[in-house]
Amino acid sequence: MYVHRVRGWSAISPPKKGLVSVPTNDRIERETLVAASVRTVWALVSAPGWWIGDGEPDHHTVHHDEQRTVVDLPPHGRFPVIVVRSDPMTYICFRCGDNAADAELTDSNSNLVEFFLTEAEGGTSLKVRESGLAAYVPDPEDRARAIEDNTEGWKIQLGWVRRRAEDAA
């Protein structure tokens, strides 16, 4: 995640193809092919908050309790994350907030980050969908910046997953 902000379109990058833009003001979608097993990719993407930051999860501090994970990323803030749903090895959905570490996460102070994993020729197809941005970032200009920032951020984060998973394979 580049700190959650949004723009007026989403980016979808199918495996082995160029970037495709789809008009929306509520979500970002990206997809990549990872030359590693589903199990290896799952081990990386199922960790709450791994995507928060600059592409290197080692650059932030993670705190866990029974209800949530909080990622501290100075100087950007604290980002609470909860698991909404998990279907091991195929799908995981998180709710992630922005500087509301002590607040209950709702549609108005957080968004959804979903990961879809499927076996594919040559490895694992990994798709990310970040949604709920229209309610979470109601100002159109702020949302535009957030989509722009996060679209680039997901490119960086999926690159990190690809490198880490392929190195482990």
Image (spheres, rainbow, N blue to C red):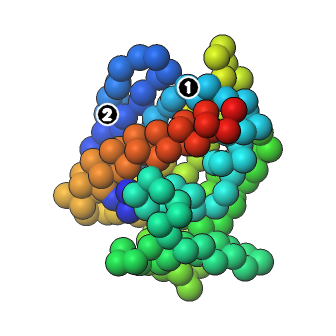
In the rendering, at what x and y percent does residue 169 appear? 69, 32
Give the mark, 2 or 1, whose residue is nearer the N terminus.
Answer: 2
As displayed, is residue 135 above or below residue 150?
Answer: below
Q: What SS does tag 1 mark?
A: strand
Measuring 46% from the left and 39% from the top, which residue is drawn there?
159
Which dot, 2 or 1, sits closer to the camera? 1
Quadrant position of residue 116 = top right
Residue drawn 64% across the image and 48% down it: 45
Q: Is residue 5 left or right of residue 159?
A: left
**Residue for badge 1:** 33
Q: On the rendered structure, is 155 left or right of 149?
A: right
Residue depicted at x 61% and y 33%: 166
Residue 94 is at least partly visible in this image: yes
Please state the horizontal and vertical placement of residue 25, each as a whole percent of the image.
Answer: 33, 46
Q: Secondary structure at mark 2?
A: strand
For residue 69, above or below residue 114: below
Whether residue 135 is visible: no
Q: Position of residue 107 (x, y in %)?
A: 51, 64
Residue most extreme to the front: 167
Q: Quadrant of residue 67?
A: bottom right
Picture coordinates of residue 164, whole percent (x, y): 58, 42
Residue sitting farthest toward the top: 121
Q: How many marks?
A: 2
Q: Which residue is mark 2?
A: 23
Label 1 neighbour load within 10 Å: few <14, some 14-19, many 20+: many
